[in-house]
């Protein structure tokens, strides 16, 4: 059992360097197999989701050479199967990006149907709608998605709801279709733009990424390139919330402040100070934080991936706050864990009503998913006493060296897999 043991109550102080964006990297790694040339990808976050997708890419015969923990070379030249094994999909949903990539390049792909994550049902109907519109025959049989096309032909596709995954998956297939594709009601997240920029550096012809209309002129072939992944806006936002919740003073560096605008605005509404530089934001927490309201929306709205972390800030803010989760139907599972730490939160449907409390108390809590796990770490850092955060495998899916970076900001946090060692830490820091 891996856990973080955290002795809270200390304001975080100092500077943290943000890594590459996990949700851009997943689309970019899948896109990399679409050329037979070699692609070099830098600023790759060294997190388990990325490492699982690299294994999936290797399992179909593509060459993957890890130059170091944050740089990888990929070559799609020797791909020898178009069937992506089920266990890779079960481990991470994003392996389904190989559906669009392999269909675009080889006009055929077989990928296991992704499992529903524990934040909602997460259907893929918009992915399938887009691929079928391009002319692919897509069938689901025995839990596998079979997609095949004589040829892919550009189409005018309107997504019934804004979907990051569907926008990326269909963009992958469309960039090697014959003719022009227009994607309407597309997702506009920074990671969509990063995947499009990566594809364009491979010779694709994509315009409008970052707006809700993306225009793609298909090309016959893609070539190799070198690419640096953008900084991770959710990792950055997580450290910004940790600074605010612990009333600390933290500079979050190597970021694109524009990507953080909704998080910055909301932290300022609670009374935190945020100072902006070219590639950093400095967040100074306040003793007198106050309530505000949040509604999660597609970018540039407040990100659903920042919702649990912001809930911890609001749990400590005087007054009554509300969080409306409009993207996923089951993303408040962490609330019961926060209540065990003394938070006063009531969930009614997709709305959490939060009455701020003066302080949280340590407890043993279990991470139910990636971002909720990060939020529980923030809560433990703000709480008095020594907390255990269990099931940290979820956190390692999306945060590289999370404990190392927090220790560098003054946090008393250690990772343990042995109860006895955990006890020694508690006694030592007690
Ligand atoms: C991506 O998931 C991210 N994951 C999620 O981050 C993020 O929460 C989400 O986008 C929203 O920003 C990756 O990028 C790997 P969606 P995705 O398709 O693509 C519904 C994290 O913590 N929908 O934008 O699965 C869906 O049910 C993870 O890093 C359909 O109805 O999200 C949801 O309600 C968690 N049909 C909404 O759209 C579809 O075909 C948005 O989902 C697809 C989606």
Image (cartoon, rainbow, N blue to C red):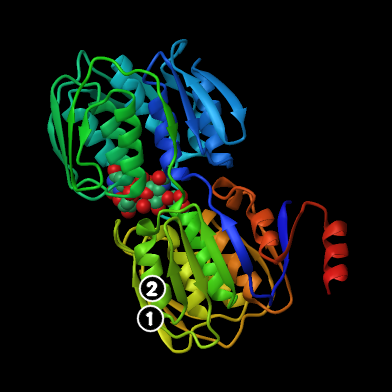
Residue 378, x across and y down, in percent: 59, 68
Residue at 40% across, 68% down: 264
Extreme residue in the front direction: 278
Residue that mark 2 sits on: 266
Vertical arrangement, residue 292 with respect to residue 76, above or below: below
Q: Which is closer to the viewer, label 1 or label 2?
A: 2
> Compared with residue 266, is residue 81 higher up or lower down, i.e. above or below?
above
Callouts 1 and 2 close, C-beta under 8 Å: yes
Q: Where is 107 relative to 201, above or below?
A: above
Rounded to the nearest whole Å, what is the CA distance between mark 1 and mark 2?
8 Å
- Which residue is at a point 35% across and 58% down the rendered structure image? 258
Does ligand 1 reach within 8 Å of label 2's beta carbon? no
- Secondary structure of the residue carrying numbered label 1: loop
SS for callout 2? helix
Q: Quadrant of residue 13?
A: bottom right
Give the camera-side residue of 260 and 124. 260
Q: Is residue 170 visible?
A: yes
Q: Which mark is residue 292?
A: 1
| Mark closer to the chain start, 1 or 2 | 2
Q: Position of residue 70 (x, y in %)?
A: 57, 36
The C terminus, quarter of image? bottom right
Q: Residues within 10 Å of mark 1 (few under 14, many from 20)?
A: many
Instruction: From the viewer's side, name the closer residue of 244 and 283.
Output: 283
């Amino acid at each position: 059992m891996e856990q973080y043991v955290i002795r809270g109550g200390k304001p975080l102080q100092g500077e943290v360097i943000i890594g590459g964006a996990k949700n851009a990297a997943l689309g970019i790694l899948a896109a990399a197999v679409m050329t037979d040339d070699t692609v070099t990808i830098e600023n790759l976050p060294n997190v388990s989701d990325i490492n699982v997708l690299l294994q999936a890419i290797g399992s179909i015969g593509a060459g993957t050479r890890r130059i170091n923990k944050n740089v990888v070379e990929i070559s799609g030249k020797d791909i020898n199967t178009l069937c992506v094994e089920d266990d890779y999909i079960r481990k991470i949903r994003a392996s389904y990006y190989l559906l669009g990539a392999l269909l675009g390049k080889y006009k055929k792909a077989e990928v296991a149907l992704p499992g529903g994550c524990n934040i909602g049902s997460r259907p893929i109907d918009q992915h399938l709608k887009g691929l079928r519109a391009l002319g692919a025959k897509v069938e689901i049989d025995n839990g596998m998605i079979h997609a095949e096309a004589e040829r892919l032909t550009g189409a005018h596709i309107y997504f019934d709801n804004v979907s990051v995954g569907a926008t990326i998956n269909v963009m992958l297939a469309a960039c090697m279709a014959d003719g022009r594709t227009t994607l309407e009601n597309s997702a506009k997240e920074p990671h969509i733009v990063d995947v499009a920029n990566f594809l364009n550096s491979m010779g694709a012809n994509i315009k409008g990424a970052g707006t809700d209309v993306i225009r793609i002129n298909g090309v016959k072939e893609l070539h190799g390139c070198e690419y640096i992944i953008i900084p991770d806006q959710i990792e950055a936002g997580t450290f910004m919330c940790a600074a605010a919740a612990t009333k600390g003073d933290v500079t979050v560096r190597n970021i694109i402040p524009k990507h953080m605008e909704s998080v910055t605005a909301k932290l300022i509404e609670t009374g935190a100070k945020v100072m902006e530089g070219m590639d950093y934001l400095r967040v100074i927490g306040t003793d007198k934080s106050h309530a505000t309201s949040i509604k999660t929306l597609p970018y540039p709205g407040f990100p659903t991936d920042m919702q649990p972390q912001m809930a911890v800030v609001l749990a400590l803010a005087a007054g009554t706050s509300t969080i409306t989760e409009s993207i996923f139907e089951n993303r408040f599972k962490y609330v019961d864990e926060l209540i065990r730490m003394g938070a006063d939160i009531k969930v009614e449907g997709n709305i959490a009503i939060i009455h701020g409390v003066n302080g949280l108390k340590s407890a043993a809590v279990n991470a139910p998913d990636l971002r909720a796990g990060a939020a529980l770490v923030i809560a433990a850092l703000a709480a008095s006493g020594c907390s255990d955060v269990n099931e940290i495998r979820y956190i390692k899916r999306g945060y590289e060296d999370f404990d190392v970076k927090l220790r560098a900001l003054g946090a008393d946090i250690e990772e343990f897999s042995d109860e006895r060692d955990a006890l020694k830490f508690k006694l030592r820091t007690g």
